[in-house]
Image: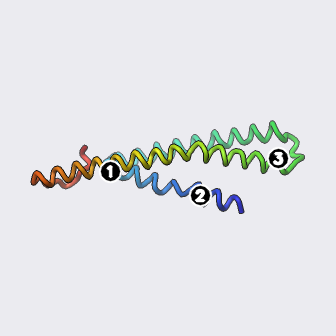
Amino acid sequence: MSYFFAYFIGEMWYGPAHAQINNLFPSQFQGYAVAIFNLAGTISGTIATATASAMFEKYDANDSNPSSAGYVIGAIVVISYGMCGPFFLLSGYEFAKEMKKRKTFIEKDSFAGIKRETACSI
């Protein structure tokens, strides 16, 4: 049951992160930006898996105590979510500032009587 809540809560950031990428980058760079984002996530996941394996080997090399595996997984989940949370909040804050700046830019252009097809050329 704890895995359900961990993945339910932990994976909620993925969709908004892709939406931010699509809103922040011009269309000709969105694919590249998403690829770099996914590469960074894959590298982080690989490092986390290697770290978990090292912790399993250190704390229960003979696999004699099943509860130690639960403690290791629990520690990894708490640490990784604790490290990602502030960055997720910072990302949302910076995204809101960027969208507000773009909205102000569009409003200034509309007051001046200038019509633009896209406002992504900032």
Residue found 21% across the figure and 52% down from its top: 106
Q: Quadrant of the C terminus?
A: top left
- Residue 108 lies left or right of residue 42; in this view the side is left
The front one of 33 and 91 is 91
- Residue 95 lies left or right of residue 61; in this view the side is left
- Residue 104 lies left or right of residue 91; in this view the side is left
What distance separates the C-alpha of mark 2 from that of mark 1?
Answer: 25 Å
Q: Secondary structure under badge 2?
A: helix
The amino acid beneath tag 1 is: Met
Residue 95 at x, y percent in the picture: 39, 48
* Mark closer to the chain start, 2 or 1: 2
Residue found 24% across the figure and 50% down from its top: 104
- Asked if the residue at tag 3 contacts the one at tag 1, i.e. Cβ–Cβ closer than 8 Å, the answer is no
What distance separates the C-alpha of mark 3 from that of mark 2?
Answer: 24 Å
Q: Secondary structure under badge 1?
A: helix
Residue 118 at x, y percent in the picture: 22, 53
- Answer with the quarter of the image where residue 46 lies: top right
